[in-house]
Image (cartoon, rainbow, N blue to C red):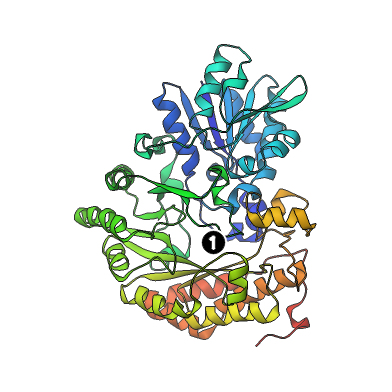
């Protein structure tokens, strides 16, 4: 075996008690599948393993890798969400240690958003031979070739961090891969697609039919620079590159025709940005008459009525908006630029097109105080979106917020797993006005206040039926166990 690519996974560590109730999704690892497809195209023998979907411990995953005796083991910690990389690093480190204990001669490399954001720290702190800074499409084939020839010519491999005579060394950053259409399809045939599971909210009208679940991509990167986001750390800069419409639809065809996938996430950080391009992709999907249940990200200031109508006709039923905050001062401070006063119009436009709304919010951004966090919750109640994600602000490596936190000595988690918003020992950022405990307490309060709101539950019942409303009520009964929260009754909330 030339190369084994493995995605580490520990639902219990990342999602806490929620992992025991099938509330979470298990998403196919796009970056791992992209790398596997590309390396296979280059003539390498590739194996792709997903420890999360298999339920393997780090030791069990290491046993699977070692049995294949690869030239190189790639541990990829890029998930379907920007936060997934950093909070997966604890388990990734345990997997690497297990690999080293089992076979010290096996060469290993870390790949993903977090290693790209902190390549030097990662190489210094983790039991790994190499770190890939960047996408990996140029780095990994060159490293494999060098390892096979048993030469130590690492200085000619772009995007590589390595050790030489005890010193940490790096090579020039690899260029971004273009054109994206030159990449093969993700190597989904190397994964058990039938076992991946969609989010519970994604399937409120068919909660017992959340499998199989697939992801497709139509672009890489984001042209915006919100200070809390780390998505561009693997690319080295903000920007966006597109696949052709034909190539995007080819991915959907493959998942539908080979695996019977109906539930699909369009994994782009920002799919709904260009009306003509979205319409072109959607027109091709409309022609196919697939009965799809897709979701995609968009921005309040980039959607149009035509775009939204085309998305719904194509089977995109959910649109995820990053509202982030209901306070203009807080939004401006993190460079999230949209007109708050336009929110009602965009919400009405989205619902008029027949789309459901996934509303994403963050409390505890640097300018947040109790009043501004209440503004955020008030906006959420007002919109009454079909689903709410509410996060406590966390400074993820690769974000401008992380750089500011380090520079100013703000409180940061003391272990990577604590970057998970659901973890027992989660530590969000303090704000200029609030402690981390106060922020986390408000987040948990707001989540339950929203999901237990009679107006929201009636809205869900009217759209998806009584079973969906009961599901949410049951979900809301599960309280996350927290180490770092206060009783919310210690302060008032309207």
Q: Residue at x 78, y 82 (%)?
A: 490
For the image, the number of numbered tags is 1
Residue 294, percent across and down? Answer: 37, 59
Where 98 falls versus 454 (above or below)?
Answer: above
Looking at the picture, tell me which residue is in the foreground, 83 or 483. Answer: 83
Q: Residue at x 71, y 57 (%)?
A: 404
The answer to whether residue 227 shows anywhere in this view is yes
Q: Which residue is mark 1?
A: 23
Where 246 falls versus 168 (above or below)?
Answer: below
The answer to whether residue 208 shows anywhere in this view is no
Residue 95, percent across and down? Answer: 66, 36
Residue 432, percent across and down? Answer: 75, 70
Looking at the picture, tell me which residue is in the foreground, 14 or 154. Answer: 154
| Location of residue 173 by image quarter | top right
Where 479 falls versus 281 (above or below)?
Answer: below
Residue 102, percent across and down? Answer: 69, 25
Looking at the picture, tell me which residue is in the foreground, 377 or 367. Answer: 367
| Location of residue 55 by image quarter | top right
Locate the C terminus and report the quarter of the image it occupies. Answer: bottom right
Is residue 413 toward the left or the right of residue 56 in the image?
Answer: right
Is residue 152 toward the left or the right of residue 352 in the image?
Answer: right
Outermost residue toward the left? Answer: 287
Looking at the picture, tell me which residue is in the foreground, 87 or 473. Answer: 87
Outermost residue toward the bottom? Answer: 494
Q: Secondary structure at mark 1?
A: loop
Crowding at label 1, few (<14), some or many (≥20) Cα neighbours within 10 Å?
A: some
């Amino acid at each position: 075996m030339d190369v084994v690519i493995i995605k580490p996974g520990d639902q219990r560590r990342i999602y806490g008690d929620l992992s025991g109730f099938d509330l979470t999704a298990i998403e196919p690892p796009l970056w791992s599948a992209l790398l596997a497809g590309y390396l296979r195209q280059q003539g390498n023998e590739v194996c792709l393993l997903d420890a999360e979907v298999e339920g393997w411990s780090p030791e069990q995953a290491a046993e699977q890798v070692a049995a294949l005796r690869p030239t190189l083991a790639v541990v990829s910690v890029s998930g379907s969400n920007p936060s997934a990389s950093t909070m997966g690093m604890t388990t990734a480190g345990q997997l690497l240690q297990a690999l080293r204990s089992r076979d010290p001669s096996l060469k290993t490399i870390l790949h993903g958003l977090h290693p790209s954001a902190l390549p030097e720290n990662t190489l210094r702190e983790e039991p790994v031979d190499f770190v890939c800074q960047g996408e990996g499409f140029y780095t990994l084939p060159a490293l494999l070739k060098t390892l096979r020839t048993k030469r130590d010519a690492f200085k000619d491999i772009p995007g590589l961090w390595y050790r030489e005579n005890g010193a940490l060394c790096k090579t020039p950053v690899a260029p971004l891969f273009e054109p994206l259409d030159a990449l093969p399809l993700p190597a989904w045939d190397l994964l058990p697609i039938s076992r991946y599971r969609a989010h519970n909210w994604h399937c409120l009208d068919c909660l017992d039919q959340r499998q199989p679940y697939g992801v497709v991509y139509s672009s890489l990167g984001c042209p915006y620079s919100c200070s809390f986001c780390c998505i561009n750390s693997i690319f080295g800069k903000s920007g966006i590159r597109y696949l052709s419409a034909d190539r995007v639809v080819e991915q959907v065809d493959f998942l539908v025709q080979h695996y019977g996938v109906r539930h699909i996430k369009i994994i782009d950080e920002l799919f709904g940005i260009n009306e003509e391009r979205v319409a072109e992709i959607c027109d091709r999907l409309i022609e196919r008459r697939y009965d799809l249940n897709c979701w995609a990200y968009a921005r309040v200031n980039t959607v149009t009525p035509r775009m939204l109508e085309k998305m719904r006709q194509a089977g995109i039923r959910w649109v995820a908006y990053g509202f982030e905050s209901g306070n203009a001062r807080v939004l401006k401070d993190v460079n999230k630029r949209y007109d708050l006063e336009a929110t009602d119009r965009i919400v009405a436009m989205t619902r008029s097109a027949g789309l459901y709304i996934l509303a994403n919010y963050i409390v505890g951004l640097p300018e947040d105080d109790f009043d501004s966090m209440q503004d955020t919750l008030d906006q959420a109640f007002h919109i009454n979106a079909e689903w709410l994600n509410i996060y406590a602000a966390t400074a993820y490596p690769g974000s401008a917020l992380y750089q500011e936190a380090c520079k100013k000595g703000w409180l940061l988690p003391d272990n990577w797993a604590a970057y998970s918003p659901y973890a027992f020992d989660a530590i969000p950022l303090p704000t200029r006005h609030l402690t981390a405990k106060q922020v986390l307490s408000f987040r948990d309060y707001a989540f339950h206040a929203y999901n237990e709101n009679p107006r929201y539950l009636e809205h869900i019942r009217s759209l998806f039926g009584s079973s969906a409303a009961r599901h949410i009520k049951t979900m809301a009964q599960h309280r996350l166990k927290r180490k770092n929260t206060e009783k919310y009754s210690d302060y008032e909330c309207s």
